[in-house]
Image (spheres, rainbow, N blue to C red):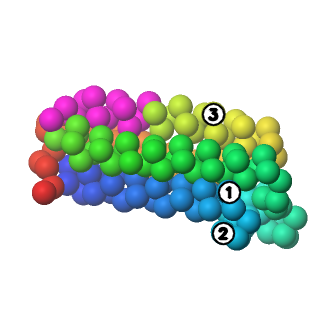
Amino acid sequence: MSPEFTSTWLKLNSLFVVLLGLLVALGAHPATALPATWLADIVFWPFDGQQTLDHQAARALAAIGGGVMVGWGVMMWLVVERLLPVDPRLARLLLIEATLAWFLVDSTGSFVAGATVNVLLNTVLMLAIVLPAWRLETAPVPAHR
């Protein structure tokens, strides 16, 4: 993978995290909760309509979790856009270590909660971020402006 392709790939993944975070945050209000409810139903397979976000606590956690995901995605974008061109080693470390920390906590919690499909989805996202970041060269990546 070229450094330019890797940078673009990581930015696309950060955009995906932001969009997923916004989808989760939509679960905070009953009028916009349907996409987040479907996501909850998917991670508690089978897709059978049994999961809802109709409790105040679930809606609050959707807002918090969605906000954290949006922040994480924006931070990933900034690391790739601004830090990677000047300090690729630090950018690589931040992307890999933060992603692995998220993966371990989220996947362990998902497993304990019985949302095993989320562990699989987390694995796909983790690999989509960590593998390209792992392959980053130590030479600076040209800025895309």
Q: Can you tell which quarter of the image residue 97 is in?
A: top left
Residue 8 at x, y percent in the picture: 28, 57
Q: SS of the residue at dot 3?
A: helix
Q: SS of the residue at dot 1?
A: helix
Task: Establish if 39 lies above or below 137.
Answer: below
Q: In the displayed structure, does residue 34 sit left or right of residue 20? A: right
Name which residue type carries label 2: Thr
For label 2, the crowd category at 10 Å Cα-Cα, with few meaning under 14, some 14 to 19 and many 20 or more, is some
Q: In the displayed structure, does residue 80 sit left or right of residue 29? A: left
Q: On the image, numbered disc 1 is attached to which residue?
A: 28
Q: On the image, numbered disc 2 is attached to which residue?
A: 32
Q: How far apart are marks 2 and 1 (CA)?
A: 8 Å
What residue is at 46 percent from the left and 55 percent from the top?
18
Q: Residue 105 carries which label?
A: 3
Name which residue type carries label 3: Val
Q: SS of the residue at dot 2?
A: helix
* Dots 2, 1 in contact, CB < 8 A: yes
Residue 127 at x, y percent in the picture: 48, 47
Q: Can you tell which quarter of the image residue 88 is in?
A: top left
Q: How far apart are marks 2 and 3 (CA)?
A: 27 Å
Instruction: Tell which residue pokes out farthest to the right in this image.
Output: 50
- What stretch of residues is rendered in magenta? 86-97
Q: Distance between the residues labelled 3 and 1?
A: 22 Å
The dominant secondary structure in magenta is helix
